[in-house]
Image: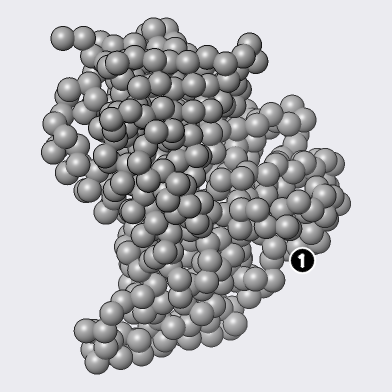
Amino acid sequence: MTDPRAVVIGAGPTGLGVGLSLALNGYGGPVTIIEQKGRSGGLAGSFDWNGHTVDFGPHRLSPAIPVVRALADELLGPDLLIKKSQHGVQFDGKLYQFPPRVVDWVAPRSLGHLMAFASSLVFEQAGWVTRRFDADTFETMLKRKFGRRFFEKVAAPMATKVWTEPQNLDPAFVAQRFASIEPFEVLKKLIFPKQDLNPSTFFYPRRGFQQLWDAMSAYLARGGQELCFDTRPVRIEVRKNRVVRIVATTAQGETAIEDPDLTLVSTIPLASLTRLLSGFEGEEELRRLSTEVHVRSMVLVALEFDQERTLPYRTLIFPERAFSFNRLFEQNEYSRDTVTAGKSVIVADITADRGAPELAQPDEVFIERVRSDLQRLPYVRTEAITAATVHRVEFAYVVPDTATRQRFHRVLHALKAISNLHVLGRFGAGEYDNSDYALDNGMTLGAMLAGRSTRAEYLTHMHAKRGRYILG
């Protein structure tokens, strides 16, 4: 029996993971991957600027997923670099390394912070005895884990800058994002320094993260899969709860994929998917619900410096509201081969609700705002800035609030009635995953479509994956 024709919409990590798994598991039917942009990778890709290759954020491959590391090694060979984690947190005018070092805490003000954080944690742990049967919220879970002071000074401001007001966040999100960090483990690392938190090493492509997706795309093309770039889907026709026709536009005009035996995998934003559906009962209500999903956009401000290195650590976190950006990362510290010799490139990311008026401000406004904030950091020489550019990312984060997760659940549950449709991805299914986790999820679905696992096994695997910790 021949496998059905498979169509994957979206060539980000999830969509490429599906295609790669189909290829590796001997899928017998034709496979088409549709991508509206001119290259693969999506949010996990890179852009070229001023002779540099710059990632859309500080991406990395975690050693926690062996299959992803093995495949990256197979595709990239010696170009897969092993890097050591270097994180910093800017707090109250001082930069602290994470995991922390004793030298960061020897100053009187730092010792005062340490004692205040510790006493707050002890107090919160003691109080939890009387509140342990109360319903958990994002706030109560973080206070119990790290103390009130940490929540108010670090977690709440950071959550507000990146996602939304803390009181709206789903408490289950704490388990994914913060469960791998234990305060007493951090204290132990402070006294006995040993970098095995967050984790200590990661893997990175020599010529930027885009190199991985380009290599993967080339591998799929050599294996006979059809990758259609600059192709935008405009309609998905459904009859009797099955997708029967997919219509897309290219520079050459409109094209259609029509097959009585068809499998469709969508990794595009849920609102985009429901807008394309035609002939499915209740599609208007699904469109309404999916447009109410809370999504955040991101503005990336990249600055070139006339020096080999700019930041003390590769990635810095800025939880305080006094800084416009959430994070800085230095591209050349991920790989020297991505940035012109003698130069360094740092990238600041600023988040806002999708469609917010502030996103339409001129590039010069964002550049000046970032430059002004950088001038307050003693380790950044703003006079060494030689160039700057701005990139806007419409879909950057799905806000993990309770209302958004409920809307995802309702829409995805209704879409299960379409028997040959599978929905996956950060914006397709609301999975808050890093790129390597998304790749792994796509490969898990591909294995089921290729007959290597049953539907029950797939559901069990995905349920277990949703509970795993997010590192990085």
Number of other residues with Cα within 10 Å of mark 1, as a class: few under 14, some 14 to 19, many 20 or more: few
Asked if residue 441 shows in the view, the reply is yes
Tell me which residue sits at (58%, 20%) in the image.
Answer: 249
**At 36% across and 49% down in the image, what residue appears?**
411
Q: Which residue is mark 1?
A: 376
In this picture the colour scheme is one colour
Q: Position of residue 247 (x, y in %)?
A: 49, 21
Quadrant of the image occupied by residue 185:
bottom left
Rendered location of residue 421, percent (x, y): 32, 32
The residue lying at 35 percent from left, 22 percent from top is 244
Query: Is 279 rendered above or below residue 303?
Result: above
Asked whether, in this view, residue 125 is left or right of residue 14, the answer is left
Quadrant holding the N terminus: top left
- Residue 308 x/y as whole percent: 72, 40
Looking at the image, which is closer to me, 80 or 153?
A: 153
Q: Name the residue at 77% across, 41% down.
A: 389
Foreground pick, 298 / 341: 298
Can you tell which quarter of the image residue 405 is in?
Answer: bottom left
Kind of residue at disc 1: Arg
344 up-or-down from 296: above or below: above
